[in-house]
C-alpha cells in the first residue's frame, strides 16, 4: 500500500472525528451518575419494551436550574396574565414569518414573535441593505406595543438563523460553519464569535438568534453535518457554553441578555444528529442511554451556562416526533435537565406530530412546546388553538404555563423597558457590520479551522516570491466558500458583489503573494500563460442546507478538479488542493493527485 493511498483511507476517519487530525477520546458510557431503573418482571412487557424503548426520566441526571426566578419578574408575569384575554395569550405562543405577516397583523393577533426564514427578508429581497432590516424591526415593534385599545404592553421579538454570523444580512461578517469551528479545538474563540454576532444583529434591530446548533452528528450523509461541531459529545459540550455566553452574556451579570448581548437558542432537541442513514427529519433509534450520553450531554452543558430557549427537533425517536413527545420536552428537559426557559418549535415541525397538521396541533402544546413556529400557517393555527383553549382541549393551566415562560424571557431581556429597535445603543451603526475588529475574529477562526491532511516536501506554507497558478471553481467564489445559510437558505446564487466586506481565496492569496514579491494567475480550468512554481486548486461541494444536502453516500463525485489536478501533475507542477465542503467526503483520487491537501470546509 503506497503512502498516498493509505493517507486516503484515513481521510474519512480523520475528518469525521470532528474534522481534526487528533481523534477525540471516546465518550464515557454515561455523562454523569444516574439512578437505577426498575427491572421489568413481566416477560410480555419486557418484549414490548425491547421492541419500542421508553424514556424513563429518572434515568437522566438531575440538574437544578442555574438561574433563580426573580420575584419582581414573577409578579409582573402574574399581573400580565390577569390582564390578558385568551386571544392575547394564544398570540404570544404563535411565531409568524415576515414573508407571511404584516405589522398590522402582529397587532391584530397579538403575536409574540416573528422570524425571517432562510429565504425571507425585508421587501422579499435577500440582499437588501441593513437599513431595511432596522426599519422593519421598528414597524413590528411599534405595532406590538400600541396599547391604545387598552391591551397590555408586550413587545414582539424577532428571531433569525444567525448560524455563522448575522449571515442573512448583506455586509455582515461571515464565520466558518460549526464543523470548521469544531476542527479548531479552541472553545474560547467561540465566545468572541458569539459576541460579534450579537453586536451585528443589534445593529439591524434584531434581538434573538436561532443558534447555536449543538447537535452531535453521527452520520456525515446528513445535510446538516456542517451545523455540528463534531461527533464527540464532550467536544460539543465544551463549545456550547462559550458560544452561548458570547451571545447572551453570563447568568447573574448585569448584561445577561442585555446591552451588547441578546437571546440565543440551543437546537435541536433531541437526537437530530443520529437519525437512521443520516436522513434529515428522520428517526433516531439510539438507545435511551445513547440518546442521553451522546445527544443529551451538550444540553446539560448549555442549560448550566444559561440557555433560555430550546428548539424542538424535527426528528423522532422510535417514531415519536420530538415536537409532541412529552417524556422529552417536559419530563426530561424541564424535569431533569433544569431548563426554565421556553421551548420553540421548528418551521411547521408541530405539523408532523401524530394527529396534527401545521394549522391544528394541541398535542404539541400539551406535550411541552411553548411557542409554535408557524411561518405561513400561523393564522389558521391561531384560530384553532384559541378554539382548543376555549373548549378545554388545552387547559388554562397549560396555556398560562406556556405564556408565562415566554413572558419570563422577555422580562429577563429587558424588553418591557426597552425602546424601539432604531433607538437602541447599537442600532444603525452600520460601520460595525464587517468592521476591521470583527473581520480579525473571523480571519482567526477561518485560519484555525483549516485542516492540513497532506504536505509532501513541505510544499506549504507557500514561499514568498512564488509564482502561483490558482485554479478550480471555488478559487474566486465567496458564495461557495461560505456554504448554506448565507444570504439565502441554501446559500445559492451569491456573487462576490453580495459580500461587500468579504474576500475570496483569490483576493486573499493575491494580496499575500504581492506583499512577498510573488504573483498569482487565476484560471479556473488550470490552463496558464507561463508555467507556475506551484498550483492551488480550490474545489468542493456546492452550498446547501438541511434535507437538500442529504446524501446517499460520502464519495465526492465531481470529477472536474481531478482532471485539473491530473493535468498539472503530468506537467510536473506541484499542486495544493483546497477542499470546500460541509462534511468529510471520500476524496482519495484527488488526494493522490495532490502534493498538499487542505480541508477548508
Image (cartoon, helix red, strand yellow):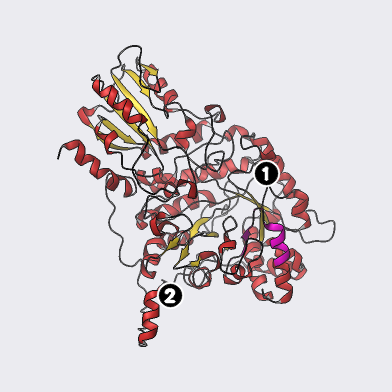
Q: Is residue 375 left or right of residue 83?
A: left
Q: Which mark is residue 246?
A: none
Percent of width and height locating residue 419: 71, 48
- Cα distance in 3D space between marks 2 and 1: 48 Å
Residue 527 lies in quadrant? top left
Mark 1 crowd level (few <14, some 14–19, many ≥20, 10 Å Cα): some
Label 1: which residue? 424
Percent of width and height locating residue 17: 31, 50
Label 2: which residue? 54
Are circles 2 and 1 on residues that touch, CB within 8 Å?
no
Percent of width and height locating residue 599: 34, 37
Sequence-wise, which precedes: disc 2 or disc 1?
Answer: 2
The answer to whether residue 371 is magenta is yes
Query: Residue at the location (37% across, 88% down)?
Result: 42
The answer to whether residue 440 is magenta is no
In the rendered image, which quarter contains the C terminus? top left
Residue 423 visible somewhere in the drawing = no
The extreme right residue here reads 149
Q: Relative to 591, is 532 above or below?
A: above
Q: Relative to 271, is 133 above or below?
A: above
Front position in the image: 385 or 136: 385
Find the magenta span and give its range.
Answer: 369-384
Amino acid at each position: 500500500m503506497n503512502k498516498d493511498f493509505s493517507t486516503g483511507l484515513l481521510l474519512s476517519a480523520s475528518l469525521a472525528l470532528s474534522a481534526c487530525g487528533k481523534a477525540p477520546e471516546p465518550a464515557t458510557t454515561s455523562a454523569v451518575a444516574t439512578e437505577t431503573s426498575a427491572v421489568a418482571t413481566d416477560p410480555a412487557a419486557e418484549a414490548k419494551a425491547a421492541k419500542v424503548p421508553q424514556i424513563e426520566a429518572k434515568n437522566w441526571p438531575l440538574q437544578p436550574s442555574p438561574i433563580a426566578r426573580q420575584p419582581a419578574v414573577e409578579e409582573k408575569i402574574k399581573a400580565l396574565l390577569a390582564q390578558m384575554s385568551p386571544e392575547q395569550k394564544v398570540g404570544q405562543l404563535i411565531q409568524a414569518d415576515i414573508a407571511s405577516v404584516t405589522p398590522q397583523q402582529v397587532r391584530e393577533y397579538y403575536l409574540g414573535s416573528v422570524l425571517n426564514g432562510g429565504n425571507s427578508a425585508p421587501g422579499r429581497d435577500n440582499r437588501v441593505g441593513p437599513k431595511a432590516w432596522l426599519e422593519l424591526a421598528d414597524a413590528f415593534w411599534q405595532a406590538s406595543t400600541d396599547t391604545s385599545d387598552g391591551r397590555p404592553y408586550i413587545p414582539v421579538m424577532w428571531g433569525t438563523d444567525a448560524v455563522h454570523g448575522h449571515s442573512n444580512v448583506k455586509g455582515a461578517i461571515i464565520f466558518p460553519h460549526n464543523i470548521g469551528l469544531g476542527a479548531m479545538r479552541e472553545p474560547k474563540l467561540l465566545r468572541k464569535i458569539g459576541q460579534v454576532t450579537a453586536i451585528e444583529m443589534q445593529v439591524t434591530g434584531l434581538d434573538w438568534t436561532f443558534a447555536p446548533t449543538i447537535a452531535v452528528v453521527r452520520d456525515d450523509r446528513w445535510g446538516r453535518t456542517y451545523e455540528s461541531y463534531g461527533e464527540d459529545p464532550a467536544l460539543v459540550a465544551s463549545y456550547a457554553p462559550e458560544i452561548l455566553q458570547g451571545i447572551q452574556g453570563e447568568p447573574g451579570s448585569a448584561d445577561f441578555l442585555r446591552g451588547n448581548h441578546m437571546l440565543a437558542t440551543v437546537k435541536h432537541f433531541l437526537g437530530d444528529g443520529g437519525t437512521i442513514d443520516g436522513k434529515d427529519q428522520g428517526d433516531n433509534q439510539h438507545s435511551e442511554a445513547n440518546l442521553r450520553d451522546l445527544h443529551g450531554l451538550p444540553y446539560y452543558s448549555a442549560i448550566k451556562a444559561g440557555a433560555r430557549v430550546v428548539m424542538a427537533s424535527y426528528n423522532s425517536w422510535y417514531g415519536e416526533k420530538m415536537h409532541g413527545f412529552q417524556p422529552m420536552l417536559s419530563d426530561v428537559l424541564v424535569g431533569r435537565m433544569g431548563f426554565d426557559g421556553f421551548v420553540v418549535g421548528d418551521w411547521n415541525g408541530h405539523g408532523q406530530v401524530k394527529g396534527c397538521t401545521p394549522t391544528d396541533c394541541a398535542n404539541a402544546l400539551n406535550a411541552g412546546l411553548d411557542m409554535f413556529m408557524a411561518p405561513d400557517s400561523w393564522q389558521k393555527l391561531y384560530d384553532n388553538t384559541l378554539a382548543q383553549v376555549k373548549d378545554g382541549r388545552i387547559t388554562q393551566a397549560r396555556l398560562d404555563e406556556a405564556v408565562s415562560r415566554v413572558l419570563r424571557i422577555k422580562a429577563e431581556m429587558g424588553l418591557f423597558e426597552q425602546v424601539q429597535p432604531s433607538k437602541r445603543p447599537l442600532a444603525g451603526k452600520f460601520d460595525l457590520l464587517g468592521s476591521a475588529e470583527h473581520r480579525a475574529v473571523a480571519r482567526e477562526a477561518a485560519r484555525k479551522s483549516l485542516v492540513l491532511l497532506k504536505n509532501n516536501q513541505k510544499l506549504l506554507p507557500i514561499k514568498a516570491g512564488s509564482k502561483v497558478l490558482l485554479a478550480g471553481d471555488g478559487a474566486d467564489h465567496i458564495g461557495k466558500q461560505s456554504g448554506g445559510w448565507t444570504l439565502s437558505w441554501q446559500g445559492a446564487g451569491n456573487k462576490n458583489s453580495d459580500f461587500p466586506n468579504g474576500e475570496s481565496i483569490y483576493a486573499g492569496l493575491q494580496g499575500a503573494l504581492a506583499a512577498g514579491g510573488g504573483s498569482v494567475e487565476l484560471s479556473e480550468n488550470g490552463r496558464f500563460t507561463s508555467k507556475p512554481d506551484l498550483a492551488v486548486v480550490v474545489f468542493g461541494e456546492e452550498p446547501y442546507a438541511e434535507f437538500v444536502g442529504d446524501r446517499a453516500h460520502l464519495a465526492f463525485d465531481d470529477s472536474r478538479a481531478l482532471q485539473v489536478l491530473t493535468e498539472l501533475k503530468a506537467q510536473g507542477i506541484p499542486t495544493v488542493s483546497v477542499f470546500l465542503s460541509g462534511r468529510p467526503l471520500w476524496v482519495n483520487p484527488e488526494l493522490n493527485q495532490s502534493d498538499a491537501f487542505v480541508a477548508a470546509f
